[in-house]
């Protein structure tokens, strides 16, 4: 009879005497799942002798486009799709902002062009009120200055023709620096004679002569620089005219290549609301005109400052000449009185010391030549300075006349080619005048060189006279 007690593993074990104890139970193999069975059916074992042998297929050549298709399918298309999705998300997010910005741009452009139209209409309607006295202080669009504020290249060229007069007057002044150099040599000889003379004021006169020689040297150098400066400023004026001519020709070429479509697109440009509509043809011409006048005035002003400095040096030279002349005139009375007494004593001595008296008279005569050269230099610089001041005054009037052209508008009845022709004629005239001036300057230089080479009037030291050598201390500057 079986036991009612359960075994430890939860199954009822048979009794020891049960015949099932020693019986052998066949174990059943576990069943394969469906996946393993499919794999086994798909790939039979190689050890199966009844399986047919696998035939190798011949490899065909690979098309190069195959790799491009692979790259496009697995790299290019996914990346582009990714960025396209991002772009769609950004556009979808910015759609309200873009709508507001477009609305603001349309409003700004409408207000801008509308205000210009209303302003022009308003000014045209109220223009007769500008004829009333003091209307410019009440109505802002009424100008308080004369309305002739247009680019007047013709008047500018007329002012520039004064440079032709300067070059014509400067032809006779190229020899002045050389003549003043010659006078310096004569003054050095005079100083040597005064030093070893018996003049009562020879010490004072020697100091004044030394100061005069140094001032004359500075004046002659500055005068040579001044003549060169006039030529330089004239070249600058010619260069400025050429520059203006090139700008005007460039404006004309750009205007010829500009069609109606490009003009319309330039006015519809949304970025124009930041800096206003594009400049018109007349505004471009006027801007170049103002630059031309400003550049010309700067060149004239620099030359005027140089002229004023040279006038001061020449006046200082004249002051030293006056002092020397006063000293010489004072000593001349003593020489005359001594000469009269000497002549009374020397009639019986066959004219002794006659050479000394002649040397004193010749030395004093040099002062008159120096004064004459100084007077010529002063006349030249003064006349040039007056002409330069006249040119600067004319340029000031032109600049005052173009101070605010936007208040009265621009004239459109003068063609651009007319301005180009005016400036071109001015360049030709100035170029011809400058060429003549340079030719005369070269002739004077060659003449001076020939005189220097063929000069044989070397001063000889007289018997009994000892030559004097003056040495200057070297100017040591840190």
Image (spheres, helix red, strand yellow):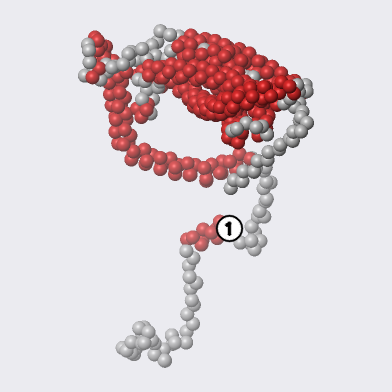
The N terminus sits in image quarter: bottom left
On screen, residue 137 versus residue 468, left or right, reads left
On screen, residue 426 versus residue 141, left or right, reads right
Residue displayed at 32% across by 13% down:
146
Q: Is residue 90 above or below residue 412?
A: below
The answer to which of 234 and 293 lies nearer the viewer is 234
Quarter of the image where one finds residue 234: top right
Residue under label 1: 43
Residue displayed at 69% across by 46% down:
58
Q: Is residue 424 above or below residue 469?
A: above
Q: Is residue 1 above or below residue 40?
A: below
The answer to which of 178 and 418 lies nearer the viewer is 178
Residue 68 position, x and y percent, is 58, 41
Residue 431 position, x and y percent, is 59, 14
Q: How many marks?
A: 1
Residue 419 visible, this angle: no
Residue displayed at 29% across by 33% down:
100
Residue displayed at 76% across by 30% down:
461
Dot 1: element: loop
Residue 61 position, x and y percent, is 67, 42
Residue 211 position, x and y percent, is 58, 33
Residue 300 visible, this angle: yes
The answer to which of 82 and 353 lies nearer the viewer is 353
The answer to which of 353 and 85 lies nearer the viewer is 353
The 10 Å Cα crowd at callout 1, few under 14, some 14 to 19, many 20 or more, is: few
């Amino acid at each position: 009879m079986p036991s009612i007690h359960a075994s430890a593993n939860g199954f009822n074990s048979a009794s020891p005497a049960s015949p099932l104890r020693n019986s052998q139970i066949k174990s059943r193999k576990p069943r394969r799942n469906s996946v393993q069975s499919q794999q086994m059916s798909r790939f039979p074992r190689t050890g199966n002798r009844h399986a047919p042998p696998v035939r190798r297929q011949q490899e065909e050549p690979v098309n190069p486009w195959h790799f491009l298709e692979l790259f496009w399918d697995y790299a290019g298309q996914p990346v582009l799709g990714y960025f396209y999705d991002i772009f769609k998300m950004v556009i979808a997010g910015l759609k309200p902002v873009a709508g507001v910005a477009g609305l603001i741009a349309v409003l700004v452009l409408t207000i801008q062009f509308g205000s210009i139209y209303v302003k022009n209409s308003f000014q045209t309607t109220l223009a007769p009120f500008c004829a009333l006295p003091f209307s410019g202080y009440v109505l802002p669009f009424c100008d308080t200055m004369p309305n002739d504020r247009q680019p007047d290249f013709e008047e500018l060229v007329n002012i520039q023709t004064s440079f032709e007069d300067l070059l014509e007057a400067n032809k006779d002044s190229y020899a002045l620096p050389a003549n003043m150099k010659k006078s310096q040599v004569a003054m050095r000889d005079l100083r040597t004679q005064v030093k070893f003379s018996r003049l009562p004021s020879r010490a004072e006169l020697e100091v004044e002569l030394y100061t005069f020689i140094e001032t004359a040297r500075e004046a002659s150098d500055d005068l040579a620089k001044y003549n060169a400066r006039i030529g330089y400023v004239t070249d600058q004026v010619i260069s400025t005219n050429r520059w203006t001519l090139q700008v005007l020709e460039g404006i004309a070429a750009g205007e010829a290549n500009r069609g109606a479509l490009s003009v319309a697109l330039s006015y519809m440009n949304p970025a124009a609301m930041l800096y206003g509509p594009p400049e018109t043809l007349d505004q471009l011409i006027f801007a170049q005109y103002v630059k031309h006048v400003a550049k010309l005035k700067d060149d004239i002003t620099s030359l005027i400052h140089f002229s004023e400095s040279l006038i001061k040096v020449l006046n200082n030279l004249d002051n030293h000449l006056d002092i020397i002349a006063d000293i010489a005139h004072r000593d001349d009375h003593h020489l005359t009185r001594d000469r009269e007494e000497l002549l009374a004593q020397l009639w019986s001595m066959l004219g002794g010391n006659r050479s000394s008296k002649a040397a004193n008279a010749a030395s004093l005569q040099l002062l008159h030549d120096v004064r004459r050269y100084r007077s010529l230099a002063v006349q030249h610089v003064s006349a040039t300075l007056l002409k330069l001041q006249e040119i600067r005054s004319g340029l000031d009037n032109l600049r005052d006349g173009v101070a605010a052209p936007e208040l009265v508008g621009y004239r459109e009845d003068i063609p651009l080619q007319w301005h180009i022709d005016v400036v071109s004629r001015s360049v030709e005239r100035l170029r011809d005048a400058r060429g003549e001036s340079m030719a005369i300057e070269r002739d004077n230089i060659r003449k001076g060189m020939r005189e220097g080479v063929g000069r044989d009037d070397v001063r000889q030291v007289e018997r009994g006279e000892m030559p004097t050598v003056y040495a200057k201390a070297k100017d040591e500057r840190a």
